[in-house]
Image (spheres, rainbow, N blue to C red):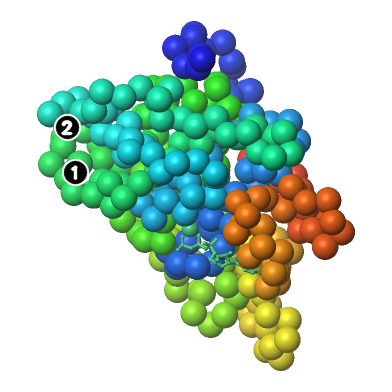
Amino acid sequence: MFSFFKPNQTTEKNQGKVIALMNQKGGVGKTTMAFNIAHAFAHQGKKVLCLDMDPQANFTSLFDIATPDLHIHHLLVNTIKELKALHTSVLISDVIVKTKQEDGVQIDLLPAGQELSGFELTVAGINAPRQLILKKFIEKYELRSQYDVIVIDGPPTLGLLVVNILCACDGVLYPFVPDRFSEQGLKNIQQVVSDIADMEITSTPKNLGYIPNLFDTRRKQATSDLANIKDTLGEAFVYEPFTNKVQFGKSLAQRKSVFQYKSTEYKDLQRQFTQMTETVQKELHS
Ligand SMILES: Nc1ncnc2c1ncn2[C@@H]1O[C@H](COP(=O)(O)OP(=O)(O)OP(=O)(O)O)[C@@H](O)[C@H]1O
Ligand SMILES: [Mg+2]
């Protein structure tokens, strides 16, 4: 039974934090990172909600559940009074999936689905601020007092879904592949963040750092390419790079995080994600 309608007794200080994995570029590891970071937090005893905001629903599919008919899109539409004709009779408690991972860790999931790709069109004509639908949804259901961390997996786009995520979260992590194509994608999303700041409709999310992924150590230029990219990233934290790891392919195929393995070949990845969550915590509270 969910306690969504209990009075919110938490203070501002111990409210949960919302973080998002974002990059306009596809295939850079947003979902892989989101899944493992969520598990890292859960292993530290945090109450974690995974929120899938990508119509591809890859994050959702990493949890061993049946594809849901009703998901985050329907809940978001239900919060918009002007769209009453499109409302579905579904409660948030019907949509949130309480997943029990194999190692006993519990993580909740708000799944996504194909309908989310029509979100922008669905809300196109409303008068209420379209950028703040997700933020208001999180406030309405007091999700910050229900969870310590809400991990959002973002889509590889730059549209209204992305703006909603950026307006709703406290901080953003940017996974990227350190090659010569990565710079523009990162610049584009920074531009959206600065546009949000200019609009002055909400606070802007903190840059929690960049995660170099699929770092190709065999390529001669890899280290200098990464150093050059780092120079363009300004003050933000740059995490230890992830190389191409077969362990990701294996674990994700089995719908498991790297924390669900005891073998030593996963130890280094476990350490990387644990350290990452420690840095994220520090950055969020600094
Ligand atoms: N460091 C890595 N080593 C090996 N495989 C990886 C690594 N990082 C990601 N992958 C694999 O690359 C693929 C793309 O990763 P992922 O789905 O996390 O990217 P994404 O940014 O979420 O993509 P999209 O933008 O389409 O949502 C997946 O099959 C994932 O298992
Ligand atoms: Mg993804």
**Disc number for residue 86:** 2
Which residue shows up at 53% across the image and 26% down it? 144
Q: Is residue 10 left or right of residue 121?
A: right
Q: Residues within 10 Å of mark 1 (few under 14, many from 20)?
A: some
Kind of residue indicated by mark 1: Thr
Q: Residue at x 70, y 61 (%)?
A: 239
The secondary element bearing badge 1 is classed as helix
**Residue ID at (79%, 58%):** 266
Does the CB distance between marks 2 and 1 fall below 8 Å? yes
2 or 1: tag closer to the N-terminus: 2
Report the mark closest to the observer, 2 or 1.
2
Name the image quarter holding residue 132. top left
Looking at the image, residue 11 lies above or below residue 23: above
The residue that label 1 is drawn on is: 122
Percent across and percent down for residue 138 are 43, 29
Residue 147 in picture, x, y percent from top left: 58, 27
Decide: is 166 above or below 81: below
Q: Position of residue 117 (x, y in %)?
A: 28, 52
Residue drawn 45% across and 68% down? 25
Residue 263 as seen in the image, left or right of residue 55: right
Judged from the image, the secondary structure of the residue bearing numbered disc 2 is: helix
Q: Which mark is residue 267?
A: none
- Nearer to the camera, 176 or 252: 252
Q: CA distance from mark 2 to mark 1?
A: 9 Å
Amino acid at pointer 2:
Leu
Q: Quadrant of residue 131?
A: top left
Q: Residue 28 location in percent, x, y?
A: 53, 67
